[in-house]
Each structure stands twice: as C-alpha cells, then as structure tokens.
Image (tube, rainbow, N blue to C red):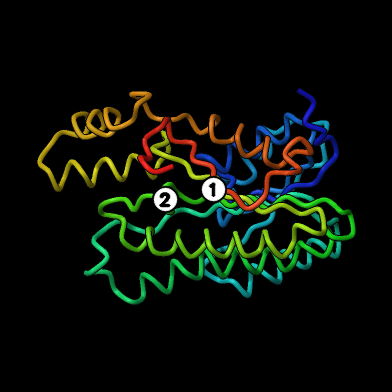
Amino acid sequence: MNLELNNKNALVCGSTQGIGKATALALAEEGVNVTLIARNEDKLKTVLTELPSHRNHSYIVADFSNPEDLKTKVSNYVETHHGFHILINNTGGPAGGPVFSADLGEFQNAFTQHLKCNHILAQTLVPFMKSEKYGRIINVISTSVKQPLDGLGVSNTIRGAVANWSKTLANELGQFGITVNNVLPGATSTERLSQIIKNKASKTGQTEDAAALAMQNAVPAKRFAKPEETAHAITFLASERASYINGINLPVDGGRTKSL
C-alpha cells in the first residue's frame, strides 16, 4: 500500500529508543523527513545515522521536564527550518506504584512531561498543518486509558487526562484536515517493560523470567509486542490512507485489554 507520506515532515518525540525510535525508522522508510527529539544528544546522533541518508533528517535536543525550553527550541526550529505535517507525542511513563501513596510532585511532573508538553507542541505545530490542510497528531499513551493497570497509579491518571485532551483536540481540528489519535501500546519489549518486570519480581518474590511469563500469559497472543509492531500502526495513522480516522484510542496490545 502506498501510504502517500513521501516528503512529509515529522517530529518524533522520545525517538532514541523503544517505540519512538521504531516509529522514526518506520516513517523514514516511507519517505518522511524525520526530526528526532529527546534530551540525550549522543543517542540522537546515533539514531540519526540509522535513518535513510537520502532524506532530510535532523534532531532537536530538549528535555520534556522543561516545557518552556522545549517550546523555545521547537519554535526556533520551525522558524529556521520547516514546519511539520506529523507530530508523534511520545514520552517515557511515570514511575510505578499505588496511586494512594503517590507524592503530589509525581503527578505534577507527569502532567508537565505528558500533557503540558503535548499541548505546547500541538500549539506550535498546528499553524503549519492548517496552512498545508494536512496534519497528524498521534499520542503514544497506554491501554490504561481503557483499563487501569495495577501498580501504575500516576500513569493511569495522567494517561487518562492525555486521552481526553486528545479527543477534545480532535473535535476542534478535524475541520482543518488535521486528525488527532491515540495509540495504546500493551506490553512491548522496551526498557520500560524490563523495569516493570523487575518491579513485579521484586514485589512478588518471583524470578524475572517467571514474572515476564505471567505477563505474557495474560495476553491472548502469549507474547510481548515488538516496538516495530506499534510503529507500523502509528505510521498508518500518520498517512493519507487514515484521513477519516479521528479521535480514536487504538490498542496495540495483542488483545490483552478486556474492554471494547
């Protein structure tokens, strides 16, 4: 299928590892000019070398714990380089733990890194999308927006806020040829999943292998996702072929989520 993405410009957040990196690679393979954004410049440079060399790829160094700095750097980039047709909002999840024992600062930090930074990026990039009559905002969040996950209290709370922000934005921007959708990864083989497995093993007294197997057995597919599998779903939603898909939550979880 021709996804008609050739020479579109995409800003991919959290693109030095996991789903973000896989998405940057998948978009680049479809002919997209990819701008990576993350806080570690050495890692950004490494990923940049892995992208197809015949495209106009670049990177921005920014820390999502500092939203004003993020706004300045992305705004300056847009003014001196080009705008973006595609925005992939993707930031590492908050630390695990029960919601009742969470410190207020944990909520504030997660709200800043996820919702506030998503909003800043949308406000910065949407004017160009409107002028092009083409825009795709895709938020990588979690299946917890449909079914809260045990032991991820802060994440469940903030992910739900992002999902509702996204749906509201989809309603407002649809008239301009801009779609806003959420992709909800399930258990995916990333560094974050490794940490979740370690935490489960520590709390239950299981080995890490036993904890991982129990998580896999909770998935009808009986395995964890590869980051590339989620990236493929994101790439489709970013394309012209998904122009009438707007305001949805798309689980990519092997069937684990029990709600519709």
Q: Is residue 182 among what the camera can see?
A: yes
Residue 69 place in picture, x, y as percent: 63, 72
Mark nearer the N terminus (2 vs 1): 2
* Number of numbered tags placed on the structure image: 2
Which residue is nearer to you in this view: 206 or 260?
260
Is residue 47 visible from the viewing direction of this image? no
Residue 1 x, y percent position in the rendering: 76, 22
158 with respect to 28 (left or right): left
Question: Callout 2 environment at 10 Å: few (<14), some (14 to 19), or many (20+)?
Answer: some
Q: Helix, strand, or loop for circle 2?
A: loop
Q: Amino acid at mark 2?
A: Lys
Give the residue displayed 36% in from the left and 70% down from the top: 106
Which residue is at a point 72% across and 50% down the rendered structure image? Answer: 136
Residue receiving disc 2: 146
- Residue occupying the point 10% across, 41% down: 205
The spot of residue 198 in percent (x, y) is: 24, 42
Establish if 256 lies above or below 72: above
Check the picture and name the quadrant holding the C terminus.
top left
- The residue indicated by pointer 1 is 249
Which image quadrant is residue 242 in? top right
- Residue 95, above or below 196: below
Q: Position of residue 70 (x, y in %)?
A: 64, 67
Spatial CA span between label 2 and label 1: 9 Å
Q: Is residue 33 left or right of residue 100?
A: right
Question: Label 1 is placed on what type of residue?
Answer: Asn
The residue sitting at the right extreme is 131
Answer whether labels 2 and 1 touch (C-beta < 8 Å).
Answer: yes
